[in-house]
Amino acid sequence: MKKIIVILVFVAVSALITGCWVENVIDGVKNVVFGVEKVVDGVEEVVDGVEKIVDGVGSSSLGDQSYGSLPYEGQIYRTVVIGTQTWMAENLNYAVEGSVCYDNKAENCTKYGRLYDWNTAKNACPDGWHLPSDKEWNELMTAAGGENVAGIKLRAKSGWDNNGTDDYGFAALPGGEGSSIVRFFSGIGTFGYWWSATESSSSHAYTTNMDLNRDKLRWDNDHKSNLSSVRCVQD
């Protein structure tokens, strides 16, 4: 009888010990699982942070307007989507033969970009971008509200003697114009001329222009030796 009681006590104690051990194992597993969940949560936070960083790379924001960026020849240009087109949001400032700074002053290139003759302008844009055609300038004009108001809506909010509203982030600046033949310059701060890739003849090509006294976007037909600003549009 005593042996039976001893055996029963042994069995009871073993079961109790085993139960405690199992509970400890289960608690340990739970702690491991909890730890893994914390690690996973941490990884998800890191991934979320990386995604936000990636989303921010190559873009910046000014007010309600978002800008992309384009590195080219040692300079980073802002880019902007207007309608279905992606434009440089700055005048090109790529130093190449056939381009000059207004009045040959470097500070004018820094602020307004360089002035180019037409043959140089044709090939001045980076790969994947090009000098816009007359048709592409017209598309921009339409996206900016039409001929009668596109000028003031595309002009920058500073840099003009009479600033624009820059509703679309194009930030057009009045770089003036010049001539590569007689080396004259005129109009900085007052008007801007931008080359079109569209020729009107073997000696002339179209330019788009804005000036401080008009809300309109206008077109001219200039000699290819003239010096005008360049904006590139994405292919």
Image: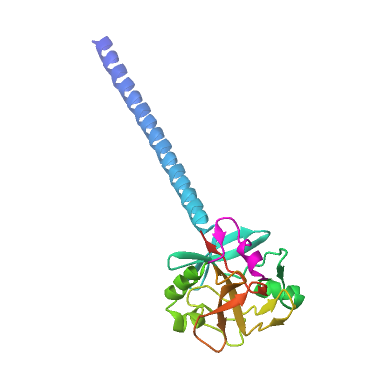
Left/right of residue 177 with respect to residue 211 in the rendered view: right
Q: Position of residue 231 (x, y in %)?
A: 58, 68
Does residue 5 sit above or below 37 in this rendering?
A: above
Residue found 33% across the figure and 20% down from its top: 14
Inspect the magenta stretch and tell me whether residue 128 lies in it.
yes
- List the single residue furthest toward the bottom: 213
Residue found 46% across the figure and 75% down from its top: 141
Q: Quadrant of residue 186?
A: bottom right
Left/right of residue 82 with respect to residue 22 in the rendered view: right
Instruction: Depth check: give the residue in front, 76 or 102.
Output: 102
Q: Position of residue 196 (x, y in %)?
A: 56, 70
Instruction: Depth check: give the residue in front, 187 or 18.
Output: 187
Q: Position of residue 188 (x, y in %)?
A: 66, 82
Q: Give the tally of numbered discs.
A: 0
Q: What's the magenta region?
A: 116-132
Residue found 71% across the figure and 67% down from its top: 98
Does residue 213 sit above or below 85 in this rendering?
A: below
Q: From the image, which quarter does the N terminus lie in?
A: top left
- List the single residue furthest toward the front: 202
Residue found 43% across the figure and 36% down from its top: 32
Q: In which quarter of the image is residue 144?
A: bottom left
- List the single residue furthest toward the left: 1
Left/right of residue 96 with respect to residue 71 in the rendered view: right
Inspect the magenta stretch and tell me whether residue 167 lies in it.
no
Q: Is residue 173 visible?
A: no
Q: Quadrant of residue 114?
A: bottom right
Q: Can residue 23 be seen in this view?
A: yes
Left/right of residue 174 with respect to residue 217 in the rendered view: right
Instruction: Depth check: give the residue in front, 228 or 220.
Output: 220
